[in-house]
Image (tube, rainbow, N blue to C red):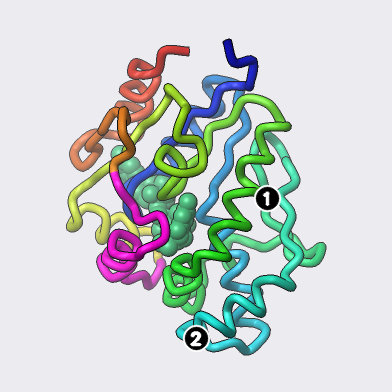
Amino acid sequence: MSTAPPVVTIDGPAASGKSSIARLVARRLGFTYVNTGNMYRAMTWAVINAGVDPHSADAVRAAAAGVVLESPVVEGRTQVCVAGHTLTDAELNSDSVNKAVSLIARVAEVRERLVADQRALIAIGPLVMEGRDIGSVVFPDSPHKIYVDASEEVRASRRSAQGHADQVAERDRMDKQRKASPLVIPEGAKVIDNSHITLEQAVEQVIAALKL
Ligand code: CDP
Ligand code: CDP
């Protein structure tokens, strides 16, 4: 029998509610919350700050290899630090990062590096980890897989209510069509559509689906 700490994996498209649900589920369970999108966003912030064209996979690959990224745990959740600087929410969710992040995330070498970092976080203990490929690639053997969905209209309106300019449909298209670990419903995942339920109801459905 495996003695590794449990990992609840939560995947889904942009603005589906993953982060809010994962944070609350982690709090309920006393697990550490890991937002892997912020790791891709931090890498994107570093690459574009270095003046690199996000469309050039070769330039992204070279620049990303030199980025020092860390994920310290603060108050039950991981932060993202680039070369010792803890990124703010404004930096992580800026228009320029929103526009470029799916271009950076499609580069296989960037993914390999971040997936290795994500797997290493198990040393912290039990995790709730959310992203796009957590149940399919990062922790495919986890028996605790959730896929959170919501309609395109609901997701676009939730993101604009947050005050961010974000082309969620365009990002989803790229995330689903890329060659390297595209967004899919992982095998064995419980699908929870939260288009028309509250955050609290979605959290209850996740907790009820888990066999921890
Ligand atoms: O919060 P939102 O759903 O808008 O996005 P996010 O979770 O912060 O992820 C930002 C971007 O990072 C996604 O659009 C993907 O391109 C990429 N990503 C990924 O490729 N794999 C992950 N495990 C997490 C995010
Ligand atoms: O992490 P992801 O981009 O998938 O979504 P999020 O940032 O957790 O959620 C986007 C917005 O939708 C947040 O302001 C949530 O509070 C809101 N939301 C909601 O109103 N009802 C839900 N059932 C889920 C999320």
Q: Pick the quarter of the image with the N terminus.
A: top right
* Rendered view: 178 above or below 204: below
Of residues 102 and 161, which is closer to you in this image? 102
Q: Earlier in the sequence, mark 1 or mark 2?
A: 2
Q: Which residues are magenta?
A: 164-184
| Ligand 1 under 8 Å from disc 1 Cβ | no
Residue 17: x and y in percent read 36, 44
Q: Quadrant of residue 85?
A: bottom right
Residue 153 located within the stretch drawn in magenta: no
Residue under label 1: 79
Circle 1 packing at 10 Å, graded few (<14), some (14-19), many (20+), is some
For residue 1, side relative to residue 168 (left or right):
right
Inspect the image, locate mark 2, and give the three-letter code of the amino acid beneath it: Ser
Residue 142: x and y in percent read 47, 27
Instruction: For marks 1 and 2, give the CA distance.
Output: 28 Å
For residue 158, side relative to residue 8 (left or right):
left
Residue under label 2: 56
| Ligand 1 under 8 Å from disc 2 Cβ | no
